[in-house]
Amino acid sequence: MKTIATTRSAMNIPTGRLAVWWVLVSEVVIFGGVLVSYLMHRLGHPEWAEEASHTNTWAGAFNTLVLLTSSLSAVLAHKAAGQGNGKRAAMLLRLTCVGGLIFLIVKSFEWTHEIREGLTLQTGGFWEYYYLAAGLHGFHVICGMLIMLWVANSADKNQDLHRVENIGIYWHFVDLVWIFLFPLLYIAK
Amino acid sequence: MASHDAAHAEHQGHDTNYVKIWLILVGLLVVSVTGPMLGIRVVTLVAAFGIAFVKAYLVVKNFMHLDIEKPVIHWALGLALLIMVVMYAGIAPDVQKSTGQRWVKSQGFHYLPAHKQEAAGEKDAGEHH
């Protein structure tokens, strides 16, 4: 038995994909709220540039590369699903998850170093935003990985291949958020 | 059901060279990291934020396929972004200003340089007299 989301369209958009976009619209407001709020505080506090100089640009750049690469494997998974190749789609989705895992490992090393340096949530406004924005983003990476593993499992059996595109759209959004977090938290010093 | 399949099919017909797009994105990442090393503020801002917008455009267009998505999605996303602009316009004056009518930011989160605090204090005292 198939779920309604796999068989019905609304406004000529499959309801599953429409739901993903609807989630992303709310995510734009969630992440946008944090980023806009950070931006206005940053512009009002030039001294935060000194705080930002403690973040590791190379770790941030490496993580950007990892997420961009994982986005490539996600879109290639979508392409494979479109060709009806569920096995390849599943393999590429799992590869995308590996990218997410590398991202989280690098982030955990970064945070450990920073916390040991005494740069915690209590250190000041910049670090509050740093941990909030990166933490919220990391949470979305974890959620995306879990859903992706579930989708890969069904794609492996050539079932519900449309979900490969849906989780891919979500993953690209997670990548997109990082594209803006990287210059805000790591480059503008 | 037929329209559902058609809606799916139109998203499968891409012949985009995804690896090429990825290479461009990686190239832009390199520029965004090396540009600020020159130490010129304008170059840093353009390299960091200008390139972020270009990268975002490439991801949205080529990976998320928003260019062939239905207009309702564009409108919904546009509305969400508009809300962000309204939020900024409404709150930024309070956050980015150091002083206002009978208020001054204290040290800590609402930091104010010492000379500005003194100036603000004198102004406030003058108003009370």
Image: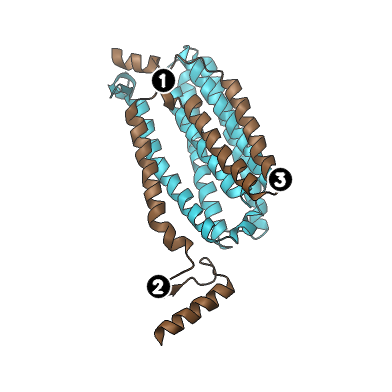
Chain colours: A cyan, B brown
Looking at this view, is A44 or A31 the one in front? Answer: A44
Give the SS element for disc 2. loop
Name the residue type under label 2.
Answer: Gln
Name the residue type under label 3.
Answer: Met
Give the left or right position of residue A65, taking residue B128 as reference.
right
Tell which residue pokes out farthest to the right in this image: B38
Q: Residue at x 57, y 70 (%)?
A: B113
Mark with earlier residue (2, 3)? 3
Distance, label 2 to label 3, CA atoms, is 41 Å
Using the image, determine if residue B117 lies above or below residue A105.
Answer: below
Q: Is residue B1 visible?
A: no
Q: Which mark is residue B33?
A: none
Q: Are marks 1 and 2 on the same chain?
A: no
Give the left or right position of residue B105, taking residue B68 as reference.
right
Give the SS element for disc 1. helix
Tell which residue pokes out farthest to the bottom in this image: B129
Q: Which mark is residue B37?
A: 3
Mark 3 packing: few (<14 Cα in 10 Å), some, or many (20+)?
few
Distance, label 3 to label 1, CA atoms, is 44 Å
Distance, label 1 to label 2, CA atoms, is 57 Å
Q: Residue at x 37, y 32 (%)?
A: B74
Q: Chain of mark 1?
A: A
Give the percent coordinates (x, y) of residue A176: 51, 36
Q: Residue at x 51, y 40 (%)?
A: A177
Give the left or right position of residue A19, taking residue A73 as reference.
left
Q: Nearer the viewer, mark 3 or mark 1?
A: 3
Q: Are marks 2 and 3 in contact (CB under 8 Å)?
A: no
| Residue identified by numbered label 1 | A162
